[in-house]
Image (cartoon, rainbow, N blue to C red):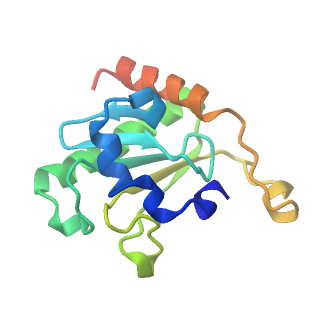
Amino acid sequence: MGYIRTAKNEFGPCLFCDKSHMGKDEDDLVVHRGENAYILMNLYPYNNGHLMVVPYDHEKNFDDLQPDTQVEMMNLMSQAMGVLRESLDADGFNFGANFGEVAGAGIKEHLHLHLVPRWIGDTNFMPVMGHTKVMVDGLKETRKQLAEAFAKNGK
């Protein structure tokens, strides 16, 4: 509800551009930085450990990115899956993107990829009956754990 109730221009010109340059990784929930893209936690996650891979370049279309950025984003996704398996014992993942408003992009001006960790039995009665998603850990605690895992991973 926080995202829904937030005025869309409250994030400034571009939320992802701001987070890419501010240098406040802990506050911005950034867990890892690459050369052309970075990984951050979703402030309004679908599941604990919901990550996004975001290019530094402000582009709305994946095919407008330089090939090295496209490749790095896919490599970061692969690395993130390994970190989530190791750190949060993820059993599987939902991996995707919404390019354009018509496709469901909440922030359509700056493309980003989503990675949502999943566990056997992670869907229960709460989302169905209570219209509530239970998060098993706080964002800051999970961010710290994942940032340490990416640093340990050595990439």
Please provide percent x and percent y for residue 37. 25, 44
Relative to 90, residue 97 above or below: below
**Residue at left offset 65%, top offset 33%:** 138
Front-lying residue, 4 or 111? 4
**Residue at left offset 44%, top offset 25%:** 147
Q: For residue 25, what is the image quadrant?
A: top left
Please provide percent x and percent y for residue 143. 52, 30
Please provide percent x and percent y for residue 120. 70, 47
Left or right: 13 with respect to 121? left
Front-lying residue, 84 or 92? 84
Please provide percent x and percent y for residue 137. 68, 32
Q: Visible in this render: residue 76? A: no
Relative to 138, residue 17 above or below: below
Relative to 154, residue 52 above or below: below
Count every numbered label the image shows and give the total. Answer: 0
Q: Visible in this render: residue 132? A: yes
**In the rendered image, which quarter contains the N terminus?**
bottom right
